[in-house]
Amino acid sequence: MAERFSLKDHLFNAETVAQLAGEYSAALPDFDAPRFEKAALAGFAERELMARLDWLADCLEPQLPTGFDAMADALEAAMPAPLDPSKTDDDFGRFIHAVPGILAVRHGLETHRDRAMALLYQATQRFSMEFYIRAFLNRWPDETLRTLQVWSGDDNYHVRRLVSEGTRPRLPWAKAVALTPAQTLPLLDHLHADPTRFVTRSVANHLNDLTRKVPQEVMDRLASWKRAGRQTPKELGWMTRHALRTLIKAGDAGAMAALGYRADAEVNVTLTVKEPTVKRGGVLAFDCVITAPEALPVLVDYRIGFARPDGRAAQKVFKLKQAQAGPDTPLKLAKAHKIKAGATTFTWHPGRHNLTLQVNGVDRAEASFDVT
């Protein structure tokens, strides 16, 4: 059996620790690289991914100056070159370069706020400081928001992305921030017109987070951005679809309408499950045909209602197709959904499952199948 991939070991290992040690050795004449490497590697086995970052900071700190200003100077001196400014997307940086953010929070949050923020500004151009800016937002909300407003116009797109990503209500792996939409939406007003997808994806993800609490405010904001015309129609269209994806999965009529899909549209749907019984490890194969009296755009999803041993309801929506349907142009779709055996994120249990086809957010056809 092939060995299972370990993200934490891929990110934190002898090679990456040696790289970090080399960067500090080049910047700090008295840095003892072998001592740092030995200590860091010895502590990895018992720690998970995020805890390994704190451990790296623990191992590095004894060899840094004790005063925060001098410590920050040393951390900046050891930083690698900034990430390539000519790129526009998916240039996240390396996890080992998160250490300055950890130490900024640990030693600068209370008594060296401005110097710590300046350290985050430099560090985020090497690795996103989205986890660490949140401590400053919670401790110094007004002051940090004023700084982020300035950063939203920075020349470096990693700094601009931090403004959106660091203030997200539901940032994965991160601590919550006590911010309201009224505090963060003005930042997005500026960022939504950004020329880089790395920034606009963050803006769209931020909006998607907000749809869980203030869906109408999100749709109103998107409409106002469309009227302003500062972003290209193509990019704003992509942002709108991405921002409303949770509402679309839930069949929200307002979100459907914002994307041009009429929930009240008349459509005819036939759904056919190829095999009524599927083994774990096999494939649920189904197809459908969608027609309408008039030509119209359709957004087609499917929802699986899962069998559970304790009888609890569980379901998940999956994307299928965005297309056109009409009386003379039937939309014919086929799907093979894998029933994975031994998946790490989800377990298929034996029993009766339900398949529902949604068109423009409305349930249109249903079928059942058994998993053995």
Image (cartoon, helix red, strand yellow):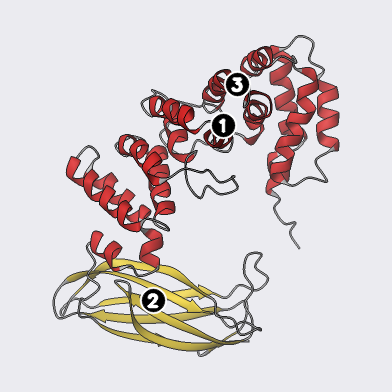
Residue 325, position as x, y percentages in the image? 21, 73
Q: Which quarter of the rendering shows the N terminus? A: bottom right
Q: Residues within 10 Å of mark 3 (few under 14, many from 20)?
A: some
Q: Which residue is mark 2?
A: 334
Residue lying at 62% horizontally and 69% vertically, measured from the top left: 346
Asked if the residue at tag 2 contacts the one at tag 3, i.e. Cβ–Cβ closer than 8 Å, the answer is no
- Check disc 1 and give the amino acid type: Phe
Q: CA distance from mark 1 to mark 3?
A: 10 Å
Q: Residues within 10 Å of mark 1 (few under 14, many from 20)?
A: many
Q: CA distance from mark 3 to mark 2?
A: 49 Å
Please tell me which of labels 3 and 2 falls first in the chain.
Answer: 3
Residue 328, position as x, y percentages in the image? 15, 79
| Of marks 1 and 3, the one in the foreground | 1
Q: Which residue is mark 3?
A: 80
Residue 308, position as x, y percentages in the image? 62, 82
Q: Which residue is mark 1?
A: 127
The front one of 340 and 30 is 30
The front one of 40 and 263 is 263
Secondary structure of the residue carrying tag 1 is loop
